[in-house]
Image (spheres, helix red, strand yellow):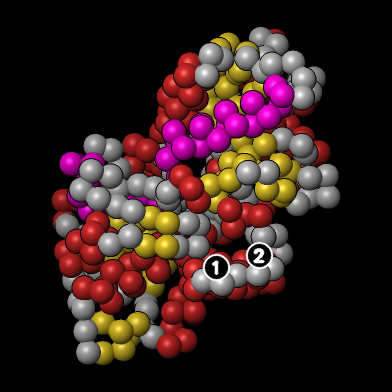
């Protein structure tokens, strides 16, 4: 039995809802044949609760899960809820797989022995953004003056640090930084300041719907040049008509599964990705990469219990840390020194097309 604490309402509901749908698909797939644990075949049971995008509520739910003797916990999709939950699970020795991407969720690793992060590391995302900048510079003027709109939270903090380091390493300059407050609906002031700095390109580092609102605000401020997005914008919400108008031809870094179902696959993991993508898309329309981490979370927990031959929290934690796992979003290789996130080679650079689809570039 696992617990899932997700943002079904509140500011993180776009990610939370996608993760709920992904969990349902993963649970149904696993329970078709069951999961062998020791000498028995078991069905996966997931207790799902809404944290309303509130850290205090998330911490309380984590306490309830611990008291209910769950074997592992999934969530939250926001950095703030994950950090709040991490404090609870760490003190009680229950493994938690965060579906967020903020590096701070699991750092320092020595203080987060039971907390694992599935979202990609900020440094890996920033490195692929450099690929986009080099690509654009090859066909025109060099894009050396970069600005950044980042969420005013742990997710954005990781982005600011990673973008600064990446730009410095590539002889580019960060000319302006503005933060996007949690819960705000209007980012026109921040966007106007960024546009006034006249950067060659702007990085938007935030989770949907903030990323889309920031892009629309930049376009309203008459900024017409290149935009780059981190994986937080890899959602179906980015494909809405109003966001597509602002984000078309922009770049986004996300897991390769965002590009769609491959025609030919010859590995079990490839087949699983194709089936998951097709099933999610048929049920819910546009595909959201924000959901895939929740599906990977339940598969990771179930796989760890099966390999351990027991559903005890400590045995599951130890298996998570010792055995690589090839998931839907890519490979996860946890160790005593690192508890996150999906491996860099699982990521790709995408461009949002005018027809609303994602085109993989690298």
**Numbered tag placed on residue 262 in the rendering:** 2
Q: Quadrant of residue 158?
A: top left
Asked if the residue at tag 1 contacts the one at tag 2, i.e. Cβ–Cβ closer than 8 Å, the answer is yes
> Most prominent secondary structure in the magenta stretch?
helix
Q: Is residue 151 left or right of residue 97?
A: right
Vertical order, 307 against 317 (above or below): below
Vertical order, 309 against 280 (above or below): below
Residue 179 location, x and y as percent?
Answer: 53, 23
Q: Nearer the viewer, residue 157 or 129?
A: 129
- Sequence-first tag of 2 and 1: 2
**Numbered tag placed on residue 83 in the rendering:** none
Query: Which contiguous range is marked in magenta?
Result: 109-138
Q: Which residue does the numbered mark 1 point to in the structure image?
A: 270
Q: Nearer the viewer, residue 342 or 241?
A: 342
Q: Is residue 319 left or right of residue 153?
A: left
Instruction: Work out whether residue 116 can be spotted.
Output: yes
Q: Is residue 134 left or right of residue 71?
A: right
Secondary structure found at label 2: loop
Quarter that holds the N terminus = bottom left
Task: Give yes or no for residue 117 being in the magenta stretch.
Answer: yes
Q: Residue at x 69, y 16 (%)?
A: 142
User: Extreme right residue here?
Assistant: 355
Q: Residue at x 28, y 44 (%)?
A: 338
Q: Nearer the viewer, residue 357 or 87?
A: 357
Vertical order, 253 against 62 (above or below): above
How far is the residue under mark 2 from the one under mark 1? 8 Å
Q: Residue at x 60, y 70 (%)?
A: 265
- How busy is the neighbourhood of tag 1: few (under 14 within 10 Å), some, or many (20 plus)? some
Instruction: Work out whether residue 160 can be spotted.
Output: no
Q: Residue at x 60, y 32 (%)?
A: 131
Residue 282 location, x and y as percent?
Answer: 69, 71
- How busy is the neighbourhood of tag 2: few (under 14 within 10 Å), some, or many (20 plus)? few
């Amino acid at each position: 039995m696992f617990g899932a604490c997700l943002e079904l309402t509140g500011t993180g509901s776009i990610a939370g809802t996608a993760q709920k749908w992904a969990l349902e698909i993963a649970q149904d797939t696993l329970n078709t044949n069951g999961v062998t644990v020791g000498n028995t075949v078991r069905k996966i049971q997931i207790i799902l609760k809404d944290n309303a995008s509130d850290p205090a509520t998330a911490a309380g739910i984590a306490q309830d899960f611990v008291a209910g003797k769950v074997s592992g916990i999934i969530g939250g999709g926001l950095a703030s809820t994950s950090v709040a939950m991490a404090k609870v699970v760490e003190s009680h020795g229950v493994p938690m797989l965060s579906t967020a991407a903020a590096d701070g969720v699991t750092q320092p690793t020595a203080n987060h022995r039971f907390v694992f992060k599935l979202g990609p590391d900020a440094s890996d995302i920033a490195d692929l953004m450099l690929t986009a900048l080099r690509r654009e510079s090859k066909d025109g003027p060099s894009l050396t003056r970069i600005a950044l709109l980042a969420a005013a939270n742990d997710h954005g903090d990781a982005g600011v640090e990673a973008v600064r380091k990446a730009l410095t390493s590539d002889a580019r300059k960060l000319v302006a930084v503005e933060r996007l407050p949690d819960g705000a609906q209007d980012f026109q002031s921040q966007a106007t300041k960024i546009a006034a700095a006249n950067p060659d390109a702007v990085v938007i580092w935030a989770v949907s719907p903030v990323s889309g609102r920031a892009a629309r605000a930049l376009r309203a401020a008459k900024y017409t040049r290149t935009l780059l997005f981190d994986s937080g914008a890899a959602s179906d919400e980015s494909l809405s008509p109003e966001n597509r108008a602002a984000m078309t031809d922009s770049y986004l870094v996300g897991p390769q599964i965002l590009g769609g179902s491959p025609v030919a696959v010859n590995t079990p993991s490839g087949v699983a990705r194709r089936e998951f993508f097709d099933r999610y898309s048929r049920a819910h329309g546009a595909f959201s990469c924000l959901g895939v981490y929740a599906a990977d979370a339940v598969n990771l927990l179930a796989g760890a219990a099966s390999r351990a031959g027991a559903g005890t929290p400590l045995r599951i934690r130890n298996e998570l840390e010792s055995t690589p796992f090839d998931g839907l979003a890519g490979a996860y290789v946890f160790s005593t020194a690192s508890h996150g996130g999906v491996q860099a080679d699982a990521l790709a650079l995408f461009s949002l097309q005018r027809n609303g689809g994602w085109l993989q570039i690298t």
